[in-house]
Amino acid sequence: MVAPLVKRIWIWCRNLLIFLFVSSILAVVVYKFVPVYYTPLMFIRMYEQHQDGKKMKLGHTWVPISKIAQPLVQAVIASEDNLFMEHNGFDVEQIQKARAEAEKGKRVRGASTISQQTAKNVFLWPGKSYLRKGIEVYFTFLIEWIWGKERIMEVYLNSIEMGEGIYGAEAVAEAHFGKHAYQLTKSEAALIAATLPNPRKFNSAKPSPYMLKRQAKIISLMGRLIKVEMGYGAGQVDPGTGKVKKRKKWRASVIMTWDESLMPMR
């Protein structure tokens, strides 16, 4: 009696794992081409708003990366993940530093790359359990392998929380600056990036002195990083005229330094 039961459980578990493995790959492949209109976090935040007796708010408009200002791409890399164009999804050095500080009893800081944040935003839920983190690692490998850097950045800038009930570059540009995402200036892009450690606490429409200080540091670091050829203003078609804007030249050298003061505290 016991042996057949164990065998059935084993077969059921095996089939479940195969199903989850295949479906996860299919989901990543589909999202390589299909816009991500909704994420688990969006529904979780709306539920929290309902529980708090607040009006449910969801501002989100998907736009291709060609309609997102290049300075915003540069700003989030400067603020969140200096080595985004270099690593394969993980910044091992920052992970080791965060672990060492945690062991010393210091406040835990974020070491997640843009790729990891994207994997979490699209496929998972907020949390700090080892299970969720392990699944995040798995999806990070998949999107790095299947999507590539430009698609990861496109999904990231369309799905990241950028304010109370505001998700993505187009939504925050319209809500806080009264313009489209491709019209954002370097200053506005840096201000948006300055909110990302805690976008529900910090408001890019009403920056605090701390945010303005952080904005200045991000702008400084943006100039020290190699220009990333993604987004409007990096050779894409002008949405208004249909003409291709002149591609700016890359910097002759690249300085990939990590500014400790910009590390998000999560």
Image (tube, rainbow, N blue to C red):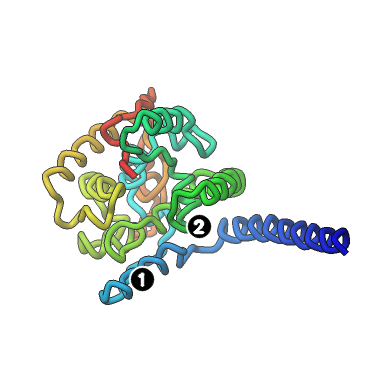
Q: Position of residue 161 (x, y in %)?
A: 35, 57
- Residue drawn at 28 percent across, 36 percent down: 262
Q: Position of residue 5 (x, y in %)?
A: 83, 63
Q: Quadrant of residue 145?
A: top right
Q: Quadrant of the C terminus?
A: top left
Whether residue 12 is situated above or below residue 207 in the rendered picture? below
- Residue drawn at 40 percent across, 46 percent down: 235
Bin the neighbour count of mark 2 within 10 Å (Cα to Cα): few under 14, some 14-19, many 20 and up. some
Residue at the left extreme?
Answer: 209
Tag 1 residue: 46
Q: Horizontal placement of 208 versus 53: left or right? A: left
Tag 2 residue: 124
Q: Horizontal placement of 258 versus 131: left or right? A: left
Q: Position of residue 115 (x, y in %)?
A: 48, 45
- Residue drawn at 88 percent across, 64 percent down: 1
Q: Nearer the viewer, residue 46 or 152?
A: 46
